[in-house]
Image: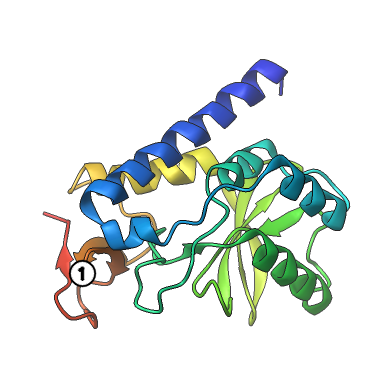
Amino acid sequence: MTDQETAGRSQAVSAAWEWIVEWLRVNAPRSHAALRPGASDALLIEAEERLGFPLHADLRILWALNAGVADDHMFGAHFLDGDGLLPLDVALDTREFLTDAWPDWAEGWVPFTADEVTAPWSGSFVDCRTGRLGVWGMETEPEEEDGLDLAGWLELIIQALRDAAGPLVGPGNAPGLAGGALVWLDPRDVHVEGWASLRR
């Protein structure tokens, strides 16, 4: 991939994330309030030194914009198809644990979302060598997803929010609002009081 292509893709990640953050500000203020400030260049360099390899440009830009979320224990922080954006230090700790737990954990894989950002159990990772995404879990083998990168994944979330009849990101989950938070649930199994689906 050329430098121009890399810059274009990273710009797409930035634009998509900024769209999501603005949507949260207007429609889900509780989720918006969970966002942490962006990581400084110094913190990102420290993270790369700890990893022993560079962060992928897409992931570096995402964490530079917002270095994770603060868990409010009431679903508000889990606005990415049911997962939350991992704080930088938690992501690195989780990666070290997964590297020990799974012999097939590749050198470039870095988790960036989790179902619980204070006690991660499953989520998504970025392959920092290719930019491709995959899924991980404490009890399941890590698996790369065919052809999906961070910009494409964020675009799926945007489509689900912008186009009420658009595609869902994950199987069964639909976006909805509850208590000022964006909460993704299976409409057939709603367990959050006051949840209202955004789907038509």
Residue 148 in sight here: no
Looking at the picture, how far across and down is residue 69, in whole percent? 49, 62
Rendered-image quadrant of the C terminus: bottom left
Q: Which residue, given by chain and number where applicable, does mark 1 sit on?
A: 178
State which quadrant residue 150 falls in: top right
**In the image, 200: left or right of 70?**
left
Looking at the picture, how far across and down is residue 65, in whole percent? 54, 42
Looking at numbered disc 1 in the image, what kind of residue is underneath it? Answer: Ala
Rendered-image quadrant of the N terminus: top right
Looking at the picture, how far across and down is residue 99, in whole percent? 80, 70
Crowd around label 1: few <14 · some 14–19 · many ≥20 (10 Å): some
Looking at the picture, how far across and down is residue 105, in whole percent? 78, 65
Q: Residue at x 41, y 66 (%)?
A: 78
Q: Residue at x 34, y 77 (%)?
A: 74
Q: Nearer the viewer, residue 91 or 199?
A: 91
**In the image, 153: left or right of 172?**
right
Q: Nearer the viewer, residue 176 or 101?
A: 176
**In the image, 9: left or right of 16?**
right
